[in-house]
Amino acid sequence: MSNACTGGAHVNLWHDMALNTVVDIEKVRSYNEKQNATLFAFRTDREAPEGQIPPRGNLDIVATPDTIKLQLQGAPELSSEQMADLTGMAVPDELKINLQSAFSLLRVVGARPKVYTNRLHVGVACAIMQADCELYDNSYGKLSSVFNYSLCPTCKYGERAKHIHLASGLYPMGRYYEVVVSKFHPHFYDRSLGWHGQTYEAALDFCDNIDGYALCPYDAVCPLGTNRSPISLYLNVSGPLEEASWVPVIDEANEWVQIALLNSCIKHSAMNPEPPEWGRSGIGNEEITRNILCCAKAGTTRMRR
C-alpha cells in the first residue's frame, strides 16, 4: 500500500484484528472429533491464482453459507450453553449467527492434522488454533503480504503463526497438469467445437484427422488418477460437469473414462465387466459422449475393435 501511494499520501497499516482473538484451544477442539483427513480450503473465485486446480474434496468456505458447509465437515451447530462455555458469557441473539460461523471454522481447522489454503481467514484461523498450515497466495499477493507483515517469525504475531508456512507457487497438483500439457498438448472438443461422434471408432478418426494428433491416453485425461479432477478443468475449457460424460481414451479398444463430478476419472472397465455396447453402436448415448480430448501423437498407440 505504501509503495502504491506515490502521491505523498500518509498510510497507516495495522494487523488483521482477528489475530488478537484468544480462545481456549483445547476447549474449542473438544467440541469436534479429531479427524485424520487433511483439510484443503482453496478458493475457487476470481481471486484464485491462475492454473490452480483445487484438490478433490476441497472446501471453499465462501462458495455457500459458511456454517452449513462447515457443519458437513464435522462442526455441528453449537447450543447456547456451548457458546457460553466457549466465550465465558451469555451470547446475545444478534451475535449467535456470527459466532456459530467463527467457532465452526476454528473447530474445523483445529481438528485437522494439516491445512492447505489460499484463503486468508482460514490462515488466520490456523494461527488462532495453532494448526499446522501451508499458506498459498491468492492471485494478487494478499496472503504473502499479510504473512510477511504480521505472521513471519519476527513479526508481531509470529509466535502464534509458528505452525504456518508460506508456500511458494501453486499447490503441487497443478504442476502435474503442467507436465501433462507440455507432454501431450491436449485439445478439448465438444459439440460446439466440431465433435459430433458417438462411437469409439468415430473418436479415433476425429483425432486422426487433426494433423499430428490422436486420441488421448488415460494419463493425459486424468493425470492424478481416479476420483481426481480431469485435465479439462485445468485447461479451463469446461466447468465441473454435473451430468455423466464419457470420454474415449486410447489405452484399450472401446475404453472410456468418466470426467463428470460423480465417479470422476474412473474408467468404464473399472465399473463394468464388458466394454460398452453403445461405444460401438452409438445407440442411445448422444448425451453422454459430447466431449473428447485429442493429444499429440508421440507416444500414443492406436487401438481399434
Image (cartoon, rainbow, N blue to C red):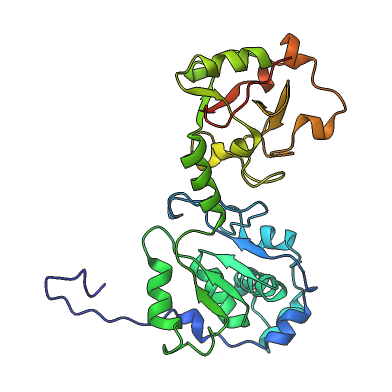
Side (left or right) of 238 relative to 152: right
Side (left or right) of 60 relative to 27: left
Q: Nearer the viewer, residue 98 or 132?
A: 132
Q: Nearer the viewer, residue 28 or 33?
A: 33
* Residue 89 appears in the figure: no
Q: How many marks?
A: 0
* Residue 118 appears in the figure: yes
Residue 198 spot, x, y in % from top left? 66, 14
Q: Residue at x 47, y 18 (%)?
A: 210
Residue 72 spot, x, y in % from top left? 74, 59
Residue 258 spot, x, y in % from top left? 70, 32
Quadrant that contains the C terminus: top right
Decide: is 13 above or below 185. Answer: below
Q: Nearer the viewer, residue 107 or 225?
A: 225
Decide: is 93 above or below 138. Answer: below
Residue 209 spot, x, y in % from top left? 50, 14
Side (left or right) of 121 relative to 268: left
Q: Nearer the viewer, residue 299 or 255?
A: 299
Q: Residue at x 68, y 20 (%)?
A: 303
Quadrant that contains the N terminus: bottom left
Q: Residue at x 41, y 75 (%)?
A: 146
Residue positioned most to the left: 7
Q: Residue at x 53, y 59 (%)?
A: 171
Decide: is 142 above or below 230. Answer: below
Decide: is 112 above or below 68. Answer: below
| Among the 4 quarters of the image, the one containing residue 233 | top right
